[in-house]
Amino acid sequence: MDRFKTKQGREIAYIKTPAKNKQLPSVVFLGGFMSDMQGSKAQFLEEKCKEHGQGYIRFDYSGHGKSSGAFTDGTISIWAEDALEILDNLTEGSQILVGSSMGGWIALLLALKRPDRVAGIVGIAAAPDFTEEIYNFELSDGQKHQLHEEGIVYMPSDYTEPYPITEPLIEDGRQNLLLNSDILKNIKCPVRLLHGKKDTAVPWEKSLKIREKLGSNDVAVHFVEDGDHSLSCEAGLTLLDGAVQAITRIVTGDMGEDFNAKNTTAIA
């Protein structure tokens, strides 16, 4: 594990695998809210990229994992800034961004900022705008009052300890909303959206909404019928590798068909 100090002074922990085949696009893994780079998907993809000869990098946003800072000081803008610093300073050439949950939001933001660097996107239960949806649909009136009075509330999680939701996180999220406008029409690269049909955190219909908003003419949504939010099951991991390789083939001009794993459905 190495550490990179951003121009904002944050120390970001990361693990980088150099490319063996520099003709292939490399891969950047963008984790989810309160997750870290030690997750099963991040490590699985690292091994697959080694097999394929592709460069790969996984990292922890500030306030996550081994990086500096407190989680409750973070916002979407700050974590996107961390990711942009990694993209700009620790990668070269074309990159495929793989974003899990919140990481899918970050991936879309990066693609808008660096269209010349982003060769494709793979979203795993991508969750753009989730902060606004939490505020509008999940917080009770009492919790909203607490948020405004105390600056923080806690939401239950199926995966970790309760999520701390801060007022700055909600307010900053509103400055980064993507699905309430046509801004995603500016994303033209190939996109593959993977989603579990049994996801209880991010409804699978969100991937369809993202698809409709994108400007790319090469977008496919893949559903894992028994998949949950993490998509760390065998079918989900197989589909993840297949999606990355499908975009890799497009980038290199090897136009093969999209990959379909068992127990999945695809919507082009």
Image (spheres, rainbow, N blue to C red):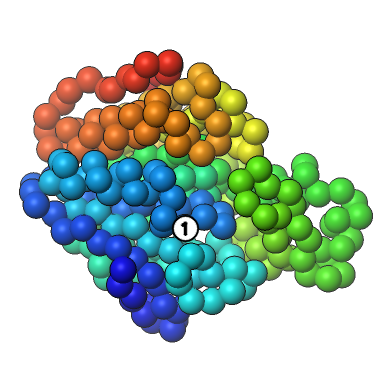
Foreground residue, 144 or 164?
A: 164
Percent position (x, y) of residue 230?
51, 39
Percent position (x, y) of residue 79?
49, 64
Direction from residue 248 to residue 104 in the image, left or right: right
Crowd class of label 1 (few under 14; some 14 to 19; many from 20; radius 10 Å): many
For the N terminus, give its image quadrant.
bottom left
Q: Is residue 99 above or below residue 85?
A: above
Direction from residue 220 to residue 172 in the image, left or right: right
Q: Quadrant of residue 72?
A: bottom right
Foreground residue, 194 or 132?
A: 194
> Which residue is drawn at the image coordinates 84% and 57% (left, top)?
144
For the C terminus, give its image quadrant.
top left
Q: What amino acid is labelled 1 in the image?
A: Asp
Percent position (x, y) of residue 183?
48, 46
Foreground residue, 68 or 28?
A: 68
Percent position (x, y) of residue 217?
33, 29
Q: Is residue 234 above or below residue 252?
A: above
Q: Is residue 185 above or below residue 256?
A: below
- Residue bearing the label numbered 1: 36
Q: Is residue 37 above or below residue 45?
A: below
Foreground residue, 59 or 211?
A: 59
> Which residue is drawn at the image coordinates 25% and 45% (left, top)?
47
